Image (cartoon, rainbow, N blue to C red):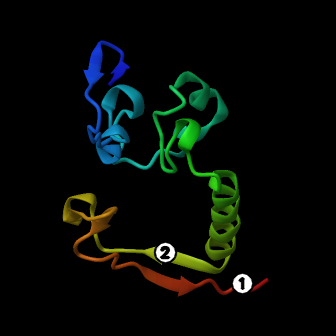
Amino acid sequence: MVSISNCTLPKDTSVILPIFTLHRRKDVWGDADEFNPDHFLPENVEKRHPFAFVPFGGGPRNCIGYQYAMFSMKVMLSAILRNFQFSTQLTMSDLELCFDVSLKLKNKHMVRLVHRSWQF
C-alpha cells in the first residue's frame, strides 16, 4: 500500500495522471488554449508548483533527457522559425483530439510553411 495525502492505494494499483487536463487547469494557467508565452517567464514559473507542467514526467523517475530535449527543441525551433513562416486556416475549435499512447490530432496538423526570403 502507498499513502498519498489522505488517500491509500492498494498494492498493484495503476494510477493514470491526466496530463492534458493538468496542463489546462484554469487556476494555474488561466485560459490554456490561448497562446501566452509569459506563462514560462522565470517570475511566473516560480509561482507554480514544480509539477504543474510535466511534459517529461516528474519526481525521482522523470526523464533523464529532459534538459537535453528542452535545449535541442529551442535550438531547432529557432532555426526553423528563422527560415520559415507558419500559417494555418484551422482554429482551436476545428482541432479534433484523440487519445492514444500520447495525445494526437485526429485531423492532422494542416500547417503551411513558406520559406522566408531574406532580402536586404
In terms of depth relative to the viewer, which is nearer, 7 or 100?
7
Q: Residue at x 20, y 65 (%)?
A: 96
Res 90 → quadrant: bottom left
Across and down, in percent, residue 72 comes to 68, 64
In this view, the residue in front, 103 or 118, is 103
Mark number, residue 86: 2
Residue 107's label in the rendered image is none
- Left or right: residue 108 versus residue 70 is left
Q: Which quadrant of the figure contains the N terminus?
A: top left
Residue farthest to the top, as pictured:
6
Occupied quadrant, residue 87: bottom left
Q: Is residue 94 above or below residue 43?
A: below
In the structure shown, which secondary structural element does the residue marked by tag 1 occupy? loop
| Mark 2: secondary structure | strand
Crowding at mark 1 (Cα within 10 Å: few <14, some 14-19, many 20+)? few
Q: Amino acid at mark 1?
A: Trp
- What residue is rendered at 54% in x and 35% in y? 59
- State the separation of the CA atoms marked 2 and 1: 16 Å
Give neighbour class at mark 2: few <14, some 14-19, many 20+ (Cα, 10 Å): few
In the picture of the structure, the residue carrying the numbered disc 1 is: 118
Does residue 107 appear left or right of residue 80 in this picture? left
Label located before the other in sequence (2 or 1): 2
Residue located 49% across and 45% down the image? 57
Give the x, y percent position of residue 43.
64, 27
